[in-house]
Amino acid sequence: MADYKLGKHGGVIRLADGASIPECPDNRDWRDYQEWLATGNTPDPAQTPEEIAAEEAAAAAEAARIQAKAADLVDALPDWATVAAKFDQGTAALANATTIAAVKAVLQGLIDVNRKLARVVYWLAKDRAD
């Protein structure tokens, strides 16, 4: 096993203590590393194949989660024509309402549309659908 491994973003990691050593000729640890290399040693790679696979799997899972969220949002959100028509119909019906029951029916329709819109806003803000 090597004493060092390459850093993911440059420099090296000393495995004995986990110290991150920047590529700096003035740094004593960097000079020690250069001497270690000069004796024929080779550092471990920045990531093992298992670490790379785990990162790729995590990225794929996150992409799938985002795709599923987008599909849920699209499925839950009525198209704008439906929303606009619902409000226009509600406004017209409210103007013509002569009973409390008629007003209640109009308001319930508007509440239903607002509930769907509020759910989408909640999903976007909380990043979950609870």
Image (spheres, rainbow, N blue to C red):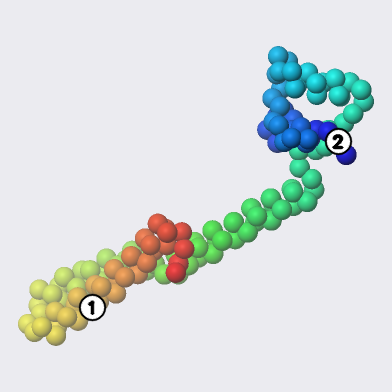
Image coordinates of residue 88 in percent, x first then y, are 21, 69
Name the kind of residue labelled 2 in the image: Ala
Q: Nearer the viewer, residue 10 or 74?
A: 10
Residue placed under numbered mark 2 in the picture: 2
Residue at the far top in the pictured view: 26
Question: What secondary structure is marked by label 1?
Answer: helix
Q: Quadrant of the C terminus?
A: bottom left
Residue placed under numbered mark 1 in the picture: 108
Name the kind of residue labelled 1 in the image: Gln
Image coordinates of residue 50 in percent, x first then y, are 78, 51
Task: Decide if residue 116 is in sight here.
Answer: yes
Residue under the image location 19 percent in, 75 percent down: 107
Q: Quadrant of residue 13?
A: top right
Please say if 88 is above or below 55: below
Of mark 2 and mark 1, the one earlier in the sequence is 2
Residue at the far right in the pictured view: 40
Image coordinates of residue 37 in percent, x first then y, are 86, 24
